[in-house]
Image: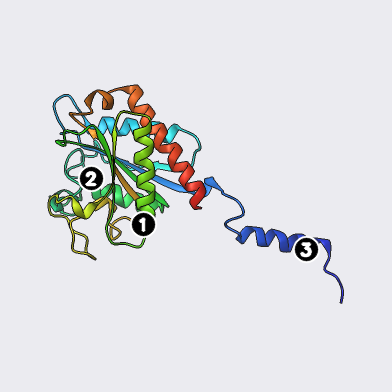
Amino acid sequence: MKKPSSLLLLLIFLIGQSFDHNSLFDKKKIVVVWQPSHQTDTGKDFSEAATCNAIVASAMTTKPKFKEHKVWSLGKTEYHHADSGSNTRILHTTAIIEGKISGYAYELQESNKLKPAVFISVHNNGGTRRNAVWGFIHYGDKYEQDNRELAARLTKAISSVSDLEDRGVWLDSTTGRNDYRCAATGKLSFYSLDEHVNNAPYRVLLEVGDNAASRELLLSDEGRKKIGIAIKKELAAWIKEKF
């Protein structure tokens, strides 16, 4: 039988390589969407939107670079609750008011257009009296365990570069907040993490600090920069292992 030519063997090898997704980690193909809080009604002389946007900006400018995008409704008057509202309240998420969709709905629509593999929402907590960081994931979908791992790694990374206590990972169904519910489970949930709303398989919401107990850190340029860098470096490590 005639032996295959060197050119044919090379072609077979290259085709095999193109379909071997584990042979090379190509970070340029990974799409990451960031959703900083757009809430500005979060206390005297404190804007959660500004704080979280600074953290996200730090993360996005830290290497390695993926295909990264920010979805943010702040200042967009064509949407209701574009600079306020709760991620767990029907009125602020799915309601149509005077013909307008909400800021949260706009952000998730924009995210889904980008088809991200990873979606990270960054918020600050309030009223907890804890100088801490919490990771939230959605209850009941098939990526729950993967998201638990990612959230745990991110909260640990944030805690390691700050004085924030690592409060670990929590299911969005356990918060008891407001009235937005997942259609599949019927349980209270975070709109931005609901698999019926957000098409990204890997979805985490970080509550970074408390707007009173962690005020000094959250208003510090250095503190916000360190937190953003820590998030990005740990996310990159997780992505490299996962994909």
Tell me if I can see residue 83 in this picture. Answer: yes
**179 displayed left or right of 166:** left
In the rendered view of the protein, which quadrant contains the N terminus? bottom right
Q: CA distance from mark 3 to mark 2?
A: 54 Å
Q: Position of residue 196 (x, y in %)?
A: 28, 60
Quarter holding residue 36: top left
Task: Tell me which residue sits at (62%, 54%) in the image.
Answer: 23
Quarter holding residue 227: top left
Residue located beneath label 3 in the image: 9
Mark 2 lies on a secondary structure that is helix
Residue located beneath label 2 in the image: 103
Disc number lying in front (3 or 2): 3
Vertical order, 5 against 91 (above or below): below
Q: Earlier in the sequence, mark 3 or mark 2?
A: 3
What label sits on residue 74 in the rendered view? none
Disc 2 marks a residue whose amino acid type is: Gly
Disc 3 marks a residue whose amino acid type is: Leu
Tell me if I can see residue 208 in this picture. Answer: no
Residue located beneath label 1 in the image: 145
Mark 1 lies on a secondary structure that is helix
Task: Tell me which residue sits at (18%, 63%) in the image.
Answer: 186
Mark 3 lies on a secondary structure that is helix
Q: Position of residue 190 (x, y in %)?
A: 23, 51
